[in-house]
C-alpha cells in the first residue's frame, strides 16, 4: 500500500508567512491599548495545474489535472491588561474551505469538498510583572483550540487537510478523513484541544510544557505531550524538545501511526547567526523510540544575505535526512522553509527513507517584491514497496505584496522523477519532466 504524502504542512502557506497574525481591524481600544478587540480576516484563493498525476491509475494518463482551492478564516481576538495581576488574551474564529475541479494530482482531494467549522477558540493569561524572577510575561498559559508551534521541525501545526479522495487504509474510501477542501493551502492549523504553559519569556533560559490532542482524522486524532528547554542569546539559541505519544484513534490509524501510542521523540536543535552579521544557521537532530525500533531524522541549513549588494541577494543550503521508519507527526517546514512543491505535496512522501539536498536563491528588487529560485535533489535511501521516489525539482516563484493586505504568489515548478508509473515510480505516463503551475492570492486584515 502506498502511504500518501503529507506535504501541505510544508507548502507556501507556511513559507510566505501569511498566517493569521495580522493585527486585524480594530473594533475597540480603551486606554491606549490596555484593552483591545480586533476583527481578523485571513483568506486565500489558488489556481493549480499539473501536467502529470501520481494517482497510479493508467486510466488517468497522460494525467493533466486542473483545480482550484479557497478559504476564508474570520473571527475576533483581543486582550486586556486591566487586571490586578497580568493580562488575559483570547480569540474565536470560523473557517470556510473548498476545492473545485479535477482534484489534486496526488489523489488526496477529489475537487468537490467544502466545509465551515470553528477554527480557534482559546483563552490565555500572561503574568506581566507579577513574577520578576521570570521576567515580563515570564508565565504564559493558554488552552483551547489554537495554533501551537515548537521551535524546530517536530511540531509546527495541525495543518494536514486531506479531502474526500484520501483513503490510506486499504479497502476504505468512505470520506472519513475529509477536512473539507483546500488541501494545498492547508489553512486549518489549530489543534482541537491544547494546553500550553510557557516559562521564562523569550531570552535566557526558558521552556514550555504542552499537551495537544488533534481532532484531525488525517492525523489519526493523535494525542501527545511535549516539553521544550531553550537558552537564547542575541547571537542564537540552543534547545531540546521531547515529545511522547499518548494515544491514537485506531479507526483512523495506518502505517507508522499504529505505533504512535507510547512513541518517544528526542531532539537537540539550534539556530542563529553565530555572531556573523547577515548569516543564518540552524540544525536539528532527532531520535524516535517505538515498538519497531529506533528511527532518526535531522537537518542542517546555512545561509547568508548580501545586505549591501543591489537587491540584497540571499543564498542558502539545506541538508535533510529521514530514516526508513520515521514518523512525520506534526512536523512542518524547517523554520517555515518548504521542501518542494510536486515532490512533497503530490508525488511521494519525502519525510521518511529520504535524503534531501536543496539550495535557495532569492533577491528583493523592492521591499514588496521577492523573487525566489529553489533546487531540490531527493535521493531515496532504500527500496520502499518497490517504488522509487528519487527525483529532482526546480521551483521558481515570487511574492509580491501589492498592498499591506494583498499578496500575489505565482509559481512554476519542474519535477523530474527517476522512474515513472509502471517502472517502479508513480508519475503517470513516463518519467518525463512534469510542469506544475500555481497562482495564489493571499488576503490578510
Image: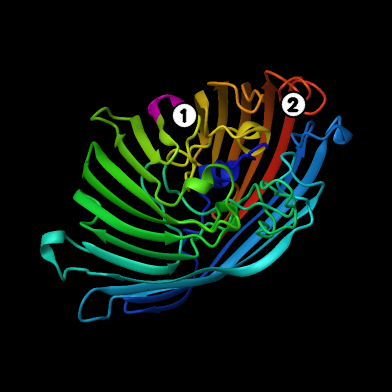
Residue 323's spot in the image, x, y percent?
A: 46, 29
Q: Mark 2 or mark 1: name the one nearer the start of the chain.
A: 1
Residue 334's spot in the image, x, y percent?
A: 44, 38
Question: Which callout, 2 or 1, points to the residue nearer the camera?
Answer: 1
Give the residues drawn in magenta, as a range: 299-323
Instruction: In this rendered view, identify the residue nearer to me: 125 or 169.
Output: 169
Tag shown at residue 434: 2
Residue 311 part of the magenta segment: yes
Give neighbour class at mark 2: few <14, some 14-19, many 20+ (Cα, 10 Å): many
Q: CA distance from mark 2 to mark 1?
A: 27 Å
Q: Residue at x 76, y 37 (%)?
A: 55
Instruction: In this rendered view, identify the residue nearer to me: 404 or 223.
Output: 223
| Picture quadrant where residue 33 is located | bottom left
Give neighbour class at mark 1: few <14, some 14-19, many 20+ (Cα, 10 Å): many
- Helix, strand or loop at label 1? It is loop
- Residue 248 drawn above or below residue 283: below
Q: How is the image coloured?
A: rainbow
Q: Is residue 428 visible from the viewing direction of this image?
A: yes
Q: Is residue 333 left or right of residue 175?
A: left
Q: Residue at x 63, y 29 (%)?
A: 396
Q: Is residue 279 left or right of residue 250?
A: left
Instruction: In this rendered view, identify the residue nearer to me: 388 or 80.
Output: 388
Residue 35's spot in the image, x, y percent?
A: 35, 77
Q: Residue at x 22, y 40 (%)?
A: 234
Q: Is residue 76 visible from the viewing direction of this image?
A: no
Q: Which residue is mark 1?
A: 323
If the image is split into quadrants, where does the C terminus sit? bottom right
Magenta part, dominant SS: strand
| Picture quadrant where residue 1 is located | top right
Residue at the front extreme? 291
Amino acid at each position: 500500500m502506498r502511504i500518501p504524502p503529507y506535504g501541505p504542512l510544508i507548502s507556501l502557506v507556511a513559507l510566505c508567512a501569511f498566517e493569521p497574525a495580522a493585527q486585524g481591524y480594530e473594533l475597540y481600544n480603551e486606554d491606549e491599548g490596555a484593552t483591545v478587540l480586533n476583527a481578523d480576516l485571513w483568506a486565500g484563493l489558488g489556481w493549480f495545474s499539473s501536467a502529470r498525476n501520481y494517482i497510479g491509475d493508467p486510466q488517468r494518463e497522460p494525467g493533466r489535472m486542473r483545480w482550484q482551492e479557497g478559504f476564508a478564516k474570520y473571527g475576533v481576538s483581543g486582550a486586556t491588561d486591566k487586571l490586578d495581576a497580568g493580562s488575559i488574551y483570547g480569540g474565536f474564529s470560523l473557517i470556510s474551505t473548498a476545492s473545485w475541479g479535477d482534484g489534486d494530482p496526488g489523489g488526496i482531494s477529489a475537487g468537490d469538498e467544502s466545509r465551515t467549522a470553528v477554527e480557534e477558540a482559546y483563552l490565555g493569561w500572561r503574568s506581566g510583572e507579577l513574577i520578576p524572577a521570570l521576567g515580563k510575561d515570564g508565565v504564559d498559559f493558554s488552552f483551547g483550540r489554537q495554533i501551537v508551534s515548537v521551535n524546530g521541525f517536530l511540531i509546527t501545526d495541525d495543518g494536514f487537510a486531506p479531502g474526500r479522495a484520501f483513503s490510506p487504509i486499504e479497502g476504505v474510501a468512505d470520506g472519513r478523513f475529509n477536512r473539507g477542501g483546500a488541501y494545498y493551502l492547508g489553512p486549518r492549523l489549530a489543534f482541537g484541544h491544547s494546553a500550553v504553559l510557557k516559562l521564562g519569556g523569550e531570552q535566557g533560559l526558558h521552556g514550555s510544557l504542552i499537551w495537544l490532542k488533534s481532532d484531525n482524522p488525517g492525523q489519526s486524532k493523535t494525542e501527545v505531550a511535549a516539553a521544550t528547554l531553550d537558552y537564547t542569546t542575541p547571537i542564537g539559541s540552543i534547545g531540546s524538545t521531547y515529545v511522547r505519544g499518548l494515544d491514537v484513534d485506531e479507526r483512523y490509524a495506518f502505517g507508522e501511526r499504529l505505533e504512535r501510542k507510547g512513541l518517544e521523540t528526542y531532539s537537540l536543535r539550534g539556530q542563529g547567526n553565530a555572531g556573523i552579521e547577515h548569516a543564518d544557521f540552524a540544525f536539528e537532530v532527532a531520535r524516535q523510540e517505538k515498538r519497531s525500533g529506533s528511527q532518526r531524522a535531522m537537518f542542517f541549513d546555512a545561509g547568508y544575505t548580501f545586505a549591501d549588494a543591489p537587491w540584497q541577494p540571499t543564498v542558502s543550503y539545506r541538508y535533510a535526512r529521514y530514516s526508513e521508519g520515521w514518523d512525520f507527526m506534526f512536523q512542518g517546514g524547517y523554520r517555515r522553509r518548504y521542501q518542494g512543491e510536486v515532490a512533497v505535496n503530490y508525488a511521494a512522501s519525502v519525510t521518511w527513507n529520504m535524503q534531501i539536498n536543496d539550495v535557495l536563491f532569492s533577491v528583493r528588487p523592492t521591499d514588496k517584491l521577492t523573487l525566489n529560485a529553489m533546487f531540490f535533489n531527493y535521493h531515496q535511501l532504500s527500496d520502499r514497496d518497490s517504488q522509487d521516489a528519487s527525483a529532482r525539482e526546480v521551483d521558481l516563484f515570487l511574492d509580491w505584496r501589492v498592498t499591506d493586505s494583498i499578496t500575489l504568489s505565482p509559481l512554476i515548478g519542474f519535477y523530474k522523477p527517476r522512474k515513472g508509473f509502471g517502472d517502479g515510480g508513480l508519475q503517470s505516463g513516463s518519467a518525463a519532466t512534469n510542469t506544475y503551475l500555481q497562482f495564489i492570492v493571499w488576503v490578510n486584515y
